[in-house]
Image (cartoon, rainbow, N blue to C red):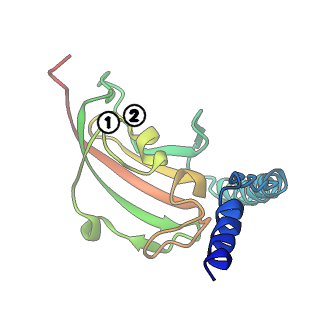
Amino acid sequence: MNRIVILLFSVLLLFSCNKAEPRKPVIRKTSTFMKESIERNQKINQLEEEILRLKLQKDSVNNYITSDFGFWYFYNQKDSLTASLPETGDEVLFTYEVKRINDSIVFNESQIGDQSYIVDKQELITGLQDGIKLMKEGETVTFLFPSHKAYGYSGAEGINPNEPLIYKVKLKKIIKNKSD
């Protein structure tokens, strides 16, 4: 009986001492997914750009400017005397309203209230981050943002995914950063 126990123990010991082989990594081909994602986003961007261009064509009253940041805007109220634009670290106080491309209001100024933003130091949709830097104190500007400059593919409360938006922004005050 002892011999059987010793033999079983030896066999178990022999098999349990084999070198463990590491698992081989699972290879996932993401190039197809990435390619499809890029193509889908390009189609969405093209469609939004067409919608925004139609909006621009229908509006014969305002002179839209094409920004280097990928959106369009016009001045509702322009200040040609003030030379100061907000710079990184400056605090700006502003109000805004948000509309859909069909001009229906999503959020009005009274719902949003006064906003404070430290330029390039706080989170804000990229369209507003870039747009505010184009404004002088006292100006009101209307921006047409494609969805990738607003809330993108995720949307937000009251805003659909991939929805281009119209923002009307009034820059009330620029408080220059004194630490420079």
Is residue 36 at least partly visible in the picture?
Answer: yes
Nearer-the-camera pick, 138 or 68: 68
Type of amino acid at the residue the image marks with label 1? Val
Does residue 9 sit above or below 127 in this rendering?
A: below
Measured as percent of width and height from the top left, residue 30 is found at 78, 53
Q: Which residue is drawn at 27% across and 40% down?
A: 138
Measured as percent of width and height from the top left, residue 135 is found at 38, 36
Q: How many marks?
A: 2
Q: Residues within 10 Å of mark 1 (few under 14, many from 20)?
A: many
Mark 1, secondary structure of its residue = loop
Q: Which residue is drawn at 72% across and 52% down?
A: 21
Q: Residues within 10 Å of mark 2 (few under 14, many from 20)?
A: some
Mark 2, secondary structure of its residue = loop
Which image quadrant: the N terminus? bottom right
The part of the image, by quadrant, that contains residue 20 is: bottom right
Residue to which mark 2 is pinned:
133
Nearer-the-camera pick, 135 or 163: 163
Residue to which mark 1 is pinned:
119
